Amino acid sequence: MFGLGNPGRRYAGTFHNAGAEAVTLLAEGNGIRLRPSGKADYGMGPVSGVTVLLGKPKTFMNASGQAVAPVYGRFAGSPGDLVVLHDDLDLDLGVVKLKRGGGTGGHNGLRSLTEELGTGEFLRVRIGIGRPPAGVDPADFVLRTVPGELRERFEGGISSAAEAVADILREGFDKAMTRWNARRGQPLS
């Protein structure tokens, strides 16, 4: 399971780092230490009773595939073994949805993964960040620090993404997807 984001202090707390923040939360909550290796930080350990690999690219978003592909090649047998957590402009802030495969939706991290892996059929945990205000370029918006008045909803989405991962591990992806996409798809209030 890889959480997408950009490295460094400059990008900490930005909308685009939702996936990386969710993996950090999972790692910390389950006592998994992420160690640097190549172009990623990753570690293995139990989450919901299942041993998993959690990771975050150390590359910038546009090169996420360069960080994930070597780890994927070493540990995964098929695209269905890879779960990617990422921000999504097309979901309201705080909403979490699951998706099996698909396109990139203009997301440069997903584009890089698809190019490097040769497939877009990996599993996705989509963390809603909402659309930018009128007149704001989406590329600029995703790199903004989440404003204080929205931080609680943003963090709620990150927590929900971690819960969704636990459900995936307990119940399988399809069952968790049905539940999250139908009943839990509402933003936190």
Image (spheres, rainbow, N blue to C red):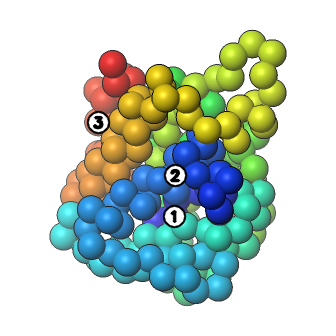
Residue 177 appears in view: no
Q: Residue at x 62, y 31 (%)?
A: 89
- Find disc 2 in the rendering and name its residue: 19
Q: Earlier in the sequence, mark 3 or mark 2?
A: 2
Residue at x 33%, y 75% (from the top left corner): 32
How much space separates mark 1 and mark 2, taking CA atoms? 8 Å
Badges 1 and 3: C-beta atoms under 8 Å apart? no
Q: Which residue is mark 1?
A: 2
Question: Mark 3 or mark 2: which is in front?
Answer: 2
Pointers 1 and 2 in contact (C-beta within 8 Å):
yes
Circles 3 and 2, Cβ within 8 Å, touching? The answer is: no
Tell which circle, 1 or 3, labels the residue nearer the N-terminal end: 1
Residue sitting at x 49%, y 39%: 127
The residue where tag 3 is placed is: 179
Could you tell whether 129 is left or right of 24 in the image? right
> Please, what is the three-letter code of the amino acid marked with disc 3?
Arg
Q: Is residue 113 above or below residue 88?
A: below
Q: Position of residue 178 (x, y in %)?
A: 33, 37
Q: Can residue 63 be seen in the rendering of this structure?
A: yes
Q: Residue 156: image x %, image y %?
A: 36, 36
